[in-house]
Amino acid sequence: MHVFLETDRLVLRPFTEADADHLVALDGDPEVMRYLNGGRPTSRRDVEERVLPRLMRDHPCSGTRGYWAAEDKATGAFLGWFELRPLDERDGSVVELGYRLNRAAWGRGYATEGARALIRKAFTDLGVERVTANTMFVNTRSRRVMEKAGLSFLRRFHGDWPESIEGSAHGEVEYQLTRAEWERRDASAG
């Protein structure tokens, strides 16, 4: 198994087609999908034809994939996934950070641990200049992870979404961390 990144408790590795069952279970949990589509499960067909190919896609401008399966380092249990993908297919200097973990992994610090490790990799190995992340304004848990990972609030906005879900009237938020900010924080912490 190729490992993209390891932390004290996580292994991030490329997705394979064998991950379909994990993704069906993850995207089948209404609470996991609450702030994404109102809690509707993703069908197996959508996972196999749309979701998994997107998660397995390479991004030539960054030389990596944009999504990685997250496993518990001690047990090998599938926990969910992390995203660190270029916003522009021609330029890997700005990437989006994301995460989707199963409920059993919530509240245990995995999202923050994985996000911090990916941010470090982005700035030290991948030539990234800015990391950005978005969520719904009302998704306080995800916003807290962004803050604990070192990102700062940038703006609140209202996207043009095809359908409204609970909380969408409050809009979305964008957080960011630049290389310069990260280097200053890293130097003062080190």
Image (cartoon, rainbow, N blue to C red):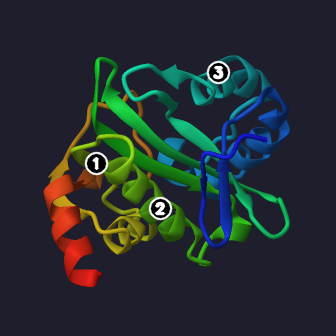
User: How many C-alpha atoms fall within 10 Å of the one at disc 2: few (<14), some, or many (≥20)?
Assistant: some
> In the rendered image of this protein, does residue 19 appear above or below residue 51?
below
Observer-side mark, 2 or 3, equals 2
Q: Is residue 81 visible?
A: yes
Say which element carries label 3.
helix
CA–CA distance in space, label 1 to label 2: 15 Å
**Residue found at x 41% / y 62%:** 139
Return the x and y of residue 171 as percentages of the image width and height: 26, 50
**Residue found at x 30% / y 59%:** 137
Say which element carries label 1.
strand
- Of pointers 1 and 2, the one earlier in the residue sequence: 2
User: How many C-alpha atoms fall within 10 Å of the one at disc 1: few (<14), some, or many (≥20)?
Assistant: many
Q: Which residue is mark 2?
A: 117
Q: Which residue is mark 1?
A: 132
Q: Amino acid at mark 2?
A: Ala
State the mark number for residue 53: 3
Q: Amino acid at mark 3?
A: Pro
The quadrant of the rendering that contains the N terminus is top right
- Of pointers 3 and 1, the one earlier in the residue sequence: 3
